[in-house]
Amino acid sequence: MTYCVGLRLNKGLVFMSDTRTNAGVDNVSVFKKMHTWEVPGDRVITLLTAGNLATTQAVVSTLEERSKAPEDRHPSVLEAPSMFRIAGLIGEVLKEVIQANVDVGQKSDSTFRATVIVGGQIRGMEPRLFLVYPEGNFVEATDDTPFFQIGETKYGKPILVRAYDPDMDFEEAIKLLLVSFDSTVKSNLSVALPFDVQTYEIDTFKVGQQIRITENNKHYKAISDNWSDALREAFVSLPDFQFEDES
């Protein structure tokens, strides 16, 4: 399983992903789920992946090959004229990879499914963030839905919904995401450190901060411990439940 988040701020974009993949409790591996293409001064595109590992690696490899080999560059994420077209291109590749691995007949394609978050900016346009589904279609982040999650989403969503503010700076946003990821790690063994973090500041057209957060990271440890303490204190401060007096 996986947990990845793409967050849209007034300042730019923030991406975070875990690195655990597993095929059972005794088969756990670490794989990078964040991939970035950059043409300084022109565009930055970041991809987060969740789902079948072979499928996601095939999608990324296909996009990589098209961006490097001149004879295969059409279409390419480095040449697409808009982020909307890039989201469509990734959807097409994702759908093709899934269909190529499904046996002929009535066998379900669920084994090969994957979901992608893609965000970035191309010169002359605004930053955009998309969620791409296994069927190849996609939706875009808006003011009403300013972030996307993929993978094991349910444990980390409440804090995002309650505390997100579009005016956050990158440091505040990363703190928020660390709380979200910590809640997920504590609730599901299939999500684990290290976490990969990347920021993109609007109109810079270059990758911002790139960080890998491990279990020894002092900031993560402090946030994890203090969040647990704060939750306990908040719980204790709530009014006690009272049984109705039936006399």
Image (cartoon, rainbow, N blue to C red):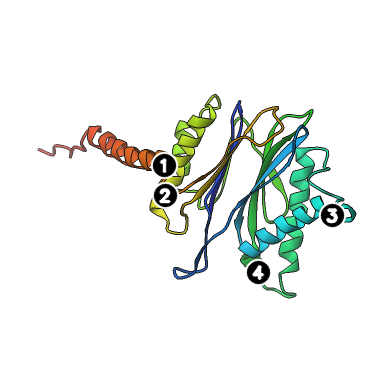
Instruction: Calculate the distance from the C-alpha at mark 1 to the C-alpha at mark 4.
Output: 40 Å
Determine the CA span between mark 2 and mark 4: 38 Å
Q: Residue at x 24, y 32 (%)?
A: 237
Residue 70 image position (x, y, % from top left): 88, 52
On screen, residue 148 versus residue 226, left or right, reads right
Tell whether label 2 touches label 3 (CB within 8 Å).
Answer: no
Instruction: Tell me if label 1 and label 2 are in contact, CB under 8 Å.
Output: yes
Q: What label sits on residue 205 in the rendered view? A: none
10 Å crowding of disc 3: few (<14), some (14-19), many (20+): few
**In x, y percent, where is residue 18?**
52, 51
- Residue corresponding to mark 1: 220
Q: Tell me, for residue 108, which label it has, or none.
A: 4
Residue most toward the right? 71
Q: Which residue is mark 3?
A: 69
Q: Residue at x 37, y 43 (%)?
A: 221
CA gap between label 3 and label 2 equals 38 Å
* Disc 2: which residue: 215
In the image, is 212 to the left or to the right of 68? left
Q: Disc 1 vs disc 4: Cβ atoms closer than 8 Å?
A: no
Q: Is residue 6 above or below residue 134?
A: above
Marks 3,1: beta carbons within 8 A:
no
User: Quadrant of the image for the C terminus?
Assistant: top left
Q: Residue furthest top?
A: 167
Name the quadrant containing residue 127: top right
Q: Earlier in the sequence, mark 2 or mark 4?
A: 4
Is the residue 15 above or below the residue 30 in the image? above
Disc 4 marks which amino acid?
Answer: Ser
Q: Is residue 206 left or right of residue 189?
A: right
